[in-house]
Amino acid sequence: MAPQGLRIDNVADAYALWWITAWQASRGNNDTPDRTVLSAVRAQAESAVTAAGELTRATDAQKQELAEALWVQTALIDGAVEQAKHDPVRLREVGAAVRKGAKSMGLDLGMIELTREGFIPVGTSQNEAPARAPHLHSAPPYGAPALAAGSMGVGGFLVLRRGRG
């Protein structure tokens, strides 16, 4: 992670790489993003983390647990794509499973494109501004990161709920 400028203990870094990995898997690849793309998505993820009310109230231990869950999911997705690279049917199945999982977390991977400026809505000119984290309580399908607007996803939700009990 360090060569890419990412920290293992940072939720935004973990979310950025998960977001890219999930998007790529939904399209049947697992190419390593260049630093410019990673940096742009990392900035978007940081905005999402900042906008996620529950996450800002989480303890450091809860944030670390969420980051670790995202890192594990990222590794599993990447491994599944790598294993399926020579089997087009399996690769489509992996992509479909990743799209379904992301959608259950509030993120429609089919509605966004990855550019050097980060994620943008499908059909948006690359000269327009990239997608930003939505305002709280809004969830546009193009870039509502699973962490934003209170929809952190199953892993994050379980981490935070467990801390309340």
Image: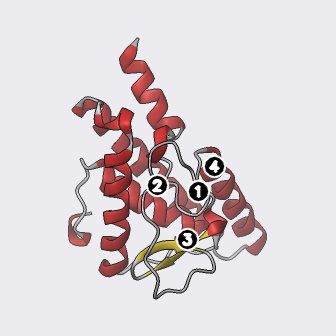
| Residue name at image x 62 percent, y 58 percent | 141
> Which sits earlier in the primary sequence, circle 2 or circle 1?
2
Gap in angstroms between the C-alphas marked 4 and 2:
20 Å
Element class at badge 2: loop
Q: Are marks 3 and 4 in contact (CB under 8 Å)?
A: no
Please name whichever residue, 75 or 160, is drawn nearer the observer in this view of the structure. 160
> Which sits earlier in the primary sequence, circle 1 or circle 3?
3
Please name whichever residue, 132 or 100, is drawn nearer the observer in this view of the structure. 132
> Which sits earlier in the primary sequence, circle 4 or circle 2?
4
Please name whichever residue, 61 or 130, is drawn nearer the observer in this view of the structure. 130
Residue at mark 2? 134
The kind of residue tagged 4 is Gly
Q: Are marks 2 and 1 in contact (CB under 8 Å)?
A: yes
Q: Quadrant of the C terminus?
A: top left
Give the x, y percent position of residue 41: 38, 68
Q: Residues within 10 Å of mark 4 (few under 14, many from 20)?
A: some
Gap in angstroms between the C-alphas marked 2 and 1:
7 Å
Give the x, y percent position of residue 149: 47, 43
The kind of residue tagged 3 is Gln
Residue at mark 4? 101
Gap in angstroms between the C-alphas marked 3 and 4:
14 Å
| Residue name at image x 47 percent, y 68 percent | 131
> Which sits earlier in the primary sequence, circle 4 or circle 1?
4
Give the x, y percent position of residue 146: 50, 48
Residue at mark 3? 24
The kind of residue tagged 1 is Pro
The kind of residue tagged 2 is Pro
Gap in angstroms between the C-alphas marked 4 and 1:
17 Å
2 left or right of 67 in image: left
> Which sits earlier in the primary sequence, circle 3 or circle 4?
3
